[in-house]
Image: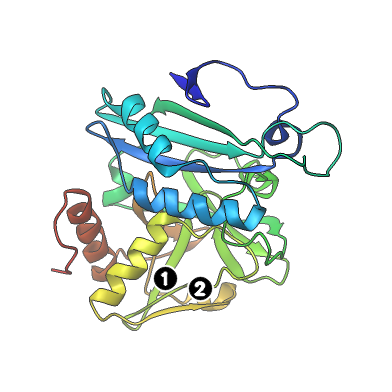
Amino acid sequence: MILVNGECKQHIEISDRGFQYGDGLFETIEVRNGQPVFLDRHLKRLNTGCRRLHIPCPDSEVITAEALDLCKDSSLAVLKLIVTRGSGGRGYRQPDLIQPTRVLSLHPYPDYPSSFVEQGIIARFCTTRLGLNPSLAGIKHMNRLEQILARAEWNDPAIQEGIMMDVNDHIIEGTMTNLFYVKNGSVYTASLSQSGIAGIMRSIIIEILSSNHIKTVEKPFKKNEFLSADEIFVSNSIIGLWPINQIENKHFSIGPLTRQIQFCLDRLKSGAEASLP
């Protein structure tokens, strides 16, 4: 089922600027037992992105009502929410009157094996680089050609994620995830001031670490520092947290801090407190 501006449709206008220019934002939301998980956080990020792009953000109460109605019969699914600047003719100039398009669509939950959570995944480094643009850094805008090119670099089903660097060789994120590494009991993740997506799960993990008094550092780092880690894991709103057990020929242990954060995330989804065991 797909809702376009609240109506059941299968199409948008060909003049829509989301189609013409990728002029919009999107959120990918886990659905469990008929409820969009962490919906308030997704709507807050959407609102932030709309302000950055100067798109009037649709009313959160309207989106929430539509999302709940769309998801009510789904035990496990993925909700995709798209907001574009709407139709506006040919050319980059924005229309004087912006009438955003909102699209909510429900999709099957990906059939990831439990081993990705329990035993970890294999990753590789991508050659495609992320450009630097502080105006767009952090938000989940619709222009994702860098990730598409990076994901096209491999077809080996044994490899589940590609690690992306920016043009200055700083490691930023995975093609579909945020990255964390553990070293000497501290947790590090990339600064996203110049590029990358500030993921919902990333922010939750940082909050868990902070509330449990674990040092967390957001900073630029390069490959050598990254590969010296004690533990590495990736996150997004659908997978939660996957440990990385191998990057190319380098192997990593699935350490205690990774397991503790997985435990906290499971508790959060069940409505419990996220205290480390």
Task: Work out how far the residue at label 2 is from the one at label 1, CA to CA, in angstroms.
Answer: 7 Å
- Place of residue 26 in the rendered image (x, y in percent of width and height, measured from the top left): 54, 42
- Place of residue 132 in the rendered image (x, y in percent of width and height, measured from the top left): 71, 65
Q: Is residue 167 visible?
A: yes
Q: Residues within 10 Å of mark 1 (few under 14, many from 20)?
A: many
- Place of residue 195 in the rendered image (x, y in percent of width and height, measured from the top left): 63, 63
Which residue position holds label 2?
226
Q: Residue at x 67, y 70 (%)?
A: 169
Q: Is residue 109 visible?
A: no
Q: Residues within 10 Å of mark 2 (few under 14, many from 20)?
A: some
Which residue position holds label 1?
181
Q: Picture quarter containing residue 154?
A: top right
Residue 12 sits above or below residue 130 on the image: above
**Which badge, 2 or 1, is on the more N-terminal residue?**
1
Q: Decide if residue 4 is on the left or right side of residue 86.
A: left
- Place of residue 87 in the rendered image (x, y in percent of width and height, measured from the top left): 72, 31
Q: Residue at x 38, y 53 (%)?
A: 41
Secondary structure state at the residue bearing disc 1: strand
Is disc 2 in contact with disc 1, using a CB cutoff of under 8 Å? Answer: yes
